Image: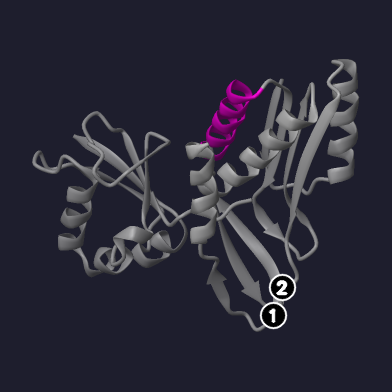
Amino acid sequence: MIGVSVQEEPFAPAELMAELVEAAAERNLGGIANFVGLVRRDGDLERLELEQFPGMTEKALNGLANEASERWPLGIVRIVHRHGSMKPGEPIVFVGVAAGHRTEALEGCAFLIDRLKTDAPFWKKEWRRDGSTRWVEAKAEDDARAEEWRAK
Amino acid sequence: MQLTIIYFAWVRERIGIDSEDIDLPYDVTTIAALLDWLRGRDERYVRAFAEPDKLRFAVDQEMVRADHSLSGARELAIFPPVTGG
């Protein structure tokens, strides 16, 4: 079961986790792994604006969820990714995976967050209190991490 | 052949438009060739495409490389390396 949401509205990680645990229990999936990414406080950062490529973000995330489900026996994949404006401390992304056992759940979850950082068409722009803005730059390390999953 | 080009993030800001429909010259067959052709049209494209290794591409919403053919493409998106997650 794959569920991908790209939305402007905030989400509550605890609620998504509770839903995932209940769905996993119903399907007798004993291993659940998850990742949540938050906007980090950083000096005078006022907010992040996430631009997205409408349509392609969902397509890319669904593609990754399918790829993960083919590589590992995953029973449930849930991805929620926000776009638009968000403040320090708010969640940006939720990745949750349920499988029979912990190995595939943990690996599937790590694969999904590592790959979405290089494959999902979102772009972060920082807005500072003094009114200045800066496009966040992608990190070479993110490319390296995604590449490792191709090599393994 | 008609091609829709969509721009995102600072690529969009430097060019000054969200998207445009162009008539692809018959001898422009790859993305790299298209970038050269656009550079020749206006200084804004020269600025936007100044660092080719900071550009990424999607043809009909699938990520591709700069040497990808534009044959049959309906939509090309040009954008910086993504920074989601």
**A42, B25: nearer the viewer:** A42
Q: Which residues are magenta?
A: A56-72
Name the residue located 59 percent from the left edge and 52 percent from the top edge.
B84
**A13, A103: nearer the viewer:** A103
Horizontal relation, residue A29 to residue A39: left or right:
right
Instruction: Locate residue A68, reporting x and y percent.
Output: 61, 29
Q: In the drawing, what numbered circle is on residue A96?
A: none
**Looking at numbered disc 2 in the image, what kind of residue is underneath it?**
Glu
Horizontal relation, residue B78 to residue A4: left or right:
left
Residue B65 picture quarter: top left
The residues bearing labels 1 and 2 have C-alpha atoms spaced at a distance of 5 Å
Q: Which residue is mark 2?
A: A46
Name the residue located 27 percent from the left edge and 63 percent from the top edge.
B45
Q: Which residue is mark 1?
A: A129
Q: How many marks?
A: 2
Name the residue located 64 percent from the left edge and 24 percent from the top edge.
A72
Same chain letter for marks 1 and 2: yes
Image height of B13 relative to A104, above or below: below
Determine whether the residue tagged by mark 2 lies in a helix, strand or loop: strand
Determine whether the residue tagged by mark 1 lies in a helix, strand or loop: loop
Is A75 magenta? The answer is: no
Horizontal relation, residue A84 to residue A103: left or right:
left
Contact (Cβ within 8 Å) of mark 1 with mark 2: yes
Q: Quarter of the image containing the N terminus of chain A?
A: top right
Which residue occupies the extreme left position in the image? B27
User: Colour scheme used in the picture?
Assistant: one colour
Name the residue located 89 percent from the left edge and 43 percent from the top edge.
A14
**Looking at numbered disc 1 in the image, what kind of residue is underneath it?**
Arg
Q: In the rendered image, is residue A121 in sight? A: no
Which residue occupies the extreme top position in the image? A27
